[in-house]
Amino acid sequence: MKFLVVGAGAVGGYFGGRLLEKGADVTFLVREGRRRNLQEKGLVIHSDYGNATLSPKTVITGEEVELYDVILLSTKAYQLDNAIDDVRPYVGENTMVIPLLNGMAHYNKLDEQFGREKVIGGLCYIEATLDSEGAVIQKGPLHMLVYGERSGQESERIIKLADALKGTKADFQLSSTIIEDLWLKYLFIATMSGITTLMRAPIGPICKHPSGMETIKQLTKEIINVMNVAGAPISNELETIQMEKIAHLAPEMKSSMQRDMEKGLPVEADHLHGYLLEIAKTADLPVPVLESVYANLKIYERSR
């Protein structure tokens, strides 16, 4: 199968690099600056699962247009519109588009642009960043990419994709419950990013303070209530599962949104928390902590 990875940042660079490392046909759709960096230094991965220096194929938007079997979208939500325009020439009748964005709002847009049948469910769990030289630095035990048909079926194409993903040094997992998986991660990401940006602290100090832990619990409850209104397929034990997960996080752990704020970068306020807030408003559902989280993020955006 032919893979097109949109971007060669931390997420796309890692998973695309692992596929390239095992001999898959991978091309990276990148900007000119990143192409020069990759040509000069290669795609460098530093990880406990094995280091690698690779020579990737790259393409600039509109250059060498050909169709791909699989397109991995590893962009931020605020880059999605441009990414859609960039990849449109590479999408054929049988192309599978797999977004790795957090949240759910992007599926409506991708379905509208490419057709629902082309868009596969996808998410990832990974702690990775680019260093000053452009190398991918992957830390921690998780380097998992989960994917699956949104219908839950094991289709012929998804089985073919699973075969193509086998044998890599990354953890690719086929899921028959990808919609539930997406909502579960959404809850965790929206809570974690919301509370750490609101408190301007890693998760440890927040959990240690009684009011901090109570705020986490309240935000979790509010988001679960919104998810129920949205008809998300979630279990009754979700709040307990969420709080246990948070309790076992490393005390120094920060959300990626918090790290972006500390660097003065854009954040995904509307895509993550704004989307939930709109559902709550439509249902006349009170969500005071979620309101505070969203206000904090929007005030930050205006101050940039």
Image (tube, helix red, strand yellow):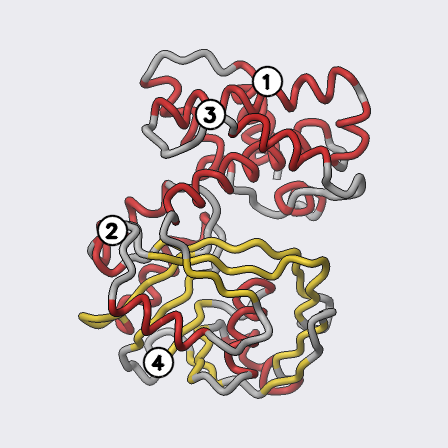
Going by the image, does 218 lie left or right of 184? right
Residue at label 1? Answer: 218
Rounded to the nearest angstrom, the CA distance separating label 4 from label 1 is 45 Å
Nearer the observer, 141 or 230: 141
Q: Secondary structure at mark 2?
A: helix
| CA neighbours of label 4 inside 10 A, class few (<14), some (14 to 19), many (20+) | few
User: Nearest the camera: 174 or 256?
Assistant: 174
Q: Count residues near mark 2 (Cα–Cα under 10 Å), then give few for <14, some for 14-19, many for 20+.
A: some
Q: Earlier in the sequence, mark 2 or mark 4?
A: 4
The tag earlier along the polypeptide, 3 or 4, is: 4
Q: Which mark is residue 1?
A: 4
What is the C-alpha distance between the residues marked 2 and 1?
Answer: 33 Å
Residue 146, percent across and down? 46, 57
Question: Is label 3 in contact with label 2 (beta carbons under 8 Å)?
Answer: no
Please state if 294 lies on the left or on the right of 111 as rendered.
right
| Numbered badge on residue 111 | 2
State the residue at coordinates (71%, 42%): 254
Q: For this rendering, which residue is in front, 301 or 175?
A: 175
Circle nearer the N terminus (2, 1): 2
Q: CA distance from mark 1 to mark 3?
A: 16 Å
